[in-house]
Amino acid sequence: MENNTQRFSNRVNNYVKYRPAYPAEIIPFLEQAIGLRKDKVIADIGSGTGIFAKNFLDYGNTVYAVEPNTAMRHKAEDLLQEYSNFISINGTAEQTNLQDGAADLVTAAQAFHWFEVPKTKAEFKRILKPGGYCCLVWNERRTTSPFEQAYEQLLFDYSLDYSKVDHKNINDKIIADFYAPAQFIKQSFDNKQVFDFESLKGRLLSSSYAPDKDHPKHNAMIENLRKIFDRFNQNNTIEFRYDTKLYVGRL
């Protein structure tokens, strides 16, 4: 398998344009659940282009954005340069390059399934302050409507390694083992995007497992995506629905 830290290097622009943000309700939920305040320091691991980090930057937190992929990290630095509370770090989940006890809250959004779990847990415990928390988040595509099921089948038919790297491979038992022996809170939020065909195509191509334009499968995949869109769109748009799943607890 391609080095996980490099998988998104040629997909940065589509990632920025077409990946979903995270529900605004997450911040007030964390205020109630773990006492999040503006003076807390966040370490966002696998921060990518800064989509999740922006929630905390807007709230007022100092955020260490730890990202190993150069193209993704540089894009975040460009997009978030106006935030004086944004600190970009070249590092991985297993070696963040942060100091001991650097953060009150460690977060990983759409990233934990790429990590080596035992090494990651040890590193997160090292960089957390005593009593600190860890928050894992995914925007999980729903697969219940006819369109959603057709899109899911498209991924199985044309993707390079979707079944291996799908974040849904991370189940509640793996999460429980990660937090053990501590307990964690699980919460779900509604989230969605609305796409025309070009933005739906961009959303597909933002995924690391989708064949890019130079791959032999690419053209057939896009042709079939067009057929799916033509079949299911309403007023030339399609709704992409998610359950945003959040897990938070001490380590």
Image (tube, rainbow, N blue to C red):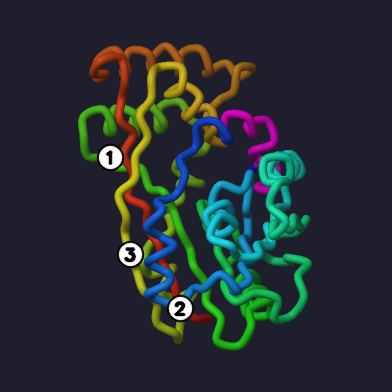
Image position, residue 96 (x, y; %): 73, 65
Label at residue 35: 2
Q: Would you place residue 185 above or below residue 46 in this image?
A: below
Mark 3, other Cα within 10 Å: few <14 / some 14–19 / many ≥20: some
Amino acid type for the residue under numbered disc 3: Gln
Query: Which comes before the other along the chain, label 1 or label 3?
Result: 1
Dot 2 lies on which element? loop
For the record, the magenta segment spans 2-14
Dot 3 lies on which element? strand
Mark 2, other Cα within 10 Å: few <14 / some 14–19 / many ≥20: few
Which image quadrant for residue 211? top right
Amino acid type for the residue under numbered disc 1: Thr
Residue 69 is covered by the magenta coloring: no
Mark 1, other Cα within 10 Å: few <14 / some 14–19 / many ≥20: some
**Which residue lies at the image location 60% right of the left edge and 60% below the top edge?**
115
Which image quadrant for residue 230? top left
According to the image, label 1 marks what residue?
A: 143
Which of the two discs, 3 and 2, sits closer to the camera? 2
Which of the two discs, 1 and 3, sits closer to the camera? 3
